[in-house]
Amino acid sequence: MDIEEYLPKKEWGRVKSFAKKHETPFLVILLDVIKRKYLELQKNMSFAEIYYAVKANPASEVITMLDGLGSSFDVASVYELRKLLSLGVAPERLSCGNTIKKLKDIEEFYRSGVRLFVTDSETDVRNIAAAAPGSKVFVRILTSGFLTASWPLSRKFGCHSDMAFELLLLANKLGLQPYGVSFHVGSQQNDISAWNTAIDQVKQIFNWLKDEGINLKCINMGGGLPGNYIEKCQDVELYASEITKCLKEDFKGEIPNVIIEPGRYLAAESGVIVSEVINVATKSKTSLERWVFTDIGKFGGLMETLDESIKYPIYTEKKENPEKVIIAGPTCDSMDTIYEEHQYEMPSDLEPGDRVYWLSTGAYTASYSAVEFNGFPPLKTFCI
């Protein structure tokens, strides 16, 4: 594997130099990579307001840097809300993006100054009206993007277009501001046409509401822009160009305000998990199948390898005689087998103590790691 397909030589050198000083496993985040991705996205989608999805990587250093660049933030819980406020992020730059929330949590968001909420059910609309009167609301719709995304999201979140129409009418009746329509085409979405299909649905809802005398003002396109893993993705320029074309075709010269909520796209390529081989074993004397056990696994931060959905690039310094292996984590749970069907090749002379580097692990790793499963602590994160 060519390391420079994922990180420039200088940045890889910084990771290696830093890693020498620390015991594995840990995650190294290169803040300059996130900054570069943010500015790249801002340049190519200048018409959109960026709301960073905090859940992707909630490190304080990441939030503070993005705040300094002018980013807004997609917030999933009161715990994220409290953290952002403690770091000095202005509440008017926050959106409550989770459609599943307690009434008392809505009250806290509103009390803190947040006035932008996403919803997808009647109960939630009524709770927002009661606890956050006069707020702006998006209704999130179901999309077909879950069929082509590596990490689909749409089945749990969103509602059908006809229900979205009814909920926006209800929001208006209850004194809320029906602000727009929200969707998410699925995380790590490689099919650009998924945005086209979703934008077509949005335009239809805009037209329905206009017939009722309500002019929606914004489209929240959520996340979905991919990061580079083993399977390469198109450049953001192509995504931006195609999405812009879809908006122009559907909305002609009256494109509404647009919000995007990148998480994986901004953070993924900034991260390297540094781990260590614990053991290399076979299950019988005649078996040709080698198991490589590392000190990082599903419960330590690699949860997105569930069903082998996300396939991280893996690097080792040894190169001799690469052979197919099964890779597993350190916990006493057979579910903690990372890659078996998609067998990676690792050098035949790999042995305990050798370091294994997992690239493009800046998103949804540390934030997924367990608190104390088998006693293992959460994944350490260092931002450099």
Image: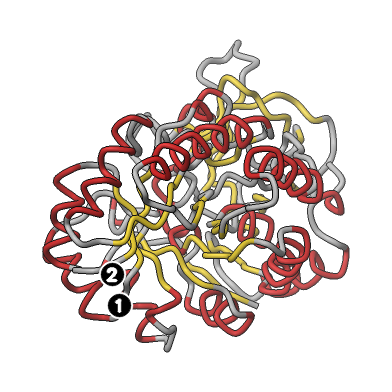
Mark 1 crowdedness (10 Å alpha carbons): few <14, some 14-19, many ≥20: some
* Left or right of 7 in this view: 246: left
In the rendered image of this protein, does residue 350 appear above or below residue 290?
Answer: below
Q: Nearer the viewer, residue 140 or 299?
A: 140
Residues at marks 1 and 2 touching, judged by CB atoms closer than 8 Å: yes
Work out how far the residue at label 1 is from the one at label 2, CA to CA, in angstroms.
Answer: 5 Å
Q: Image quadrant for the C terminus?
A: bottom right
Tally of numbered tags: 2
**Quadrant of the image occupied by residue 91:** bottom left
Q: Nearer the viewer, residue 345 or 320?
A: 345
What amino acid type should be assigned to the residue bearing mark 1? Arg
* Left or right of 307 in this view: 81: left
Instruction: Name the mark on residue 320.
Output: none
Residue located at (48% from left, 57% from top): 217
Q: Secondary structure at mark 2?
A: helix
Instruction: Name the mark on residue 79.
Output: 2
Q: Is residue 314 visible?
A: no
| Residue that mark 1 sits on | 82
**Quadrant of the image occupied by residue 15:** bottom right
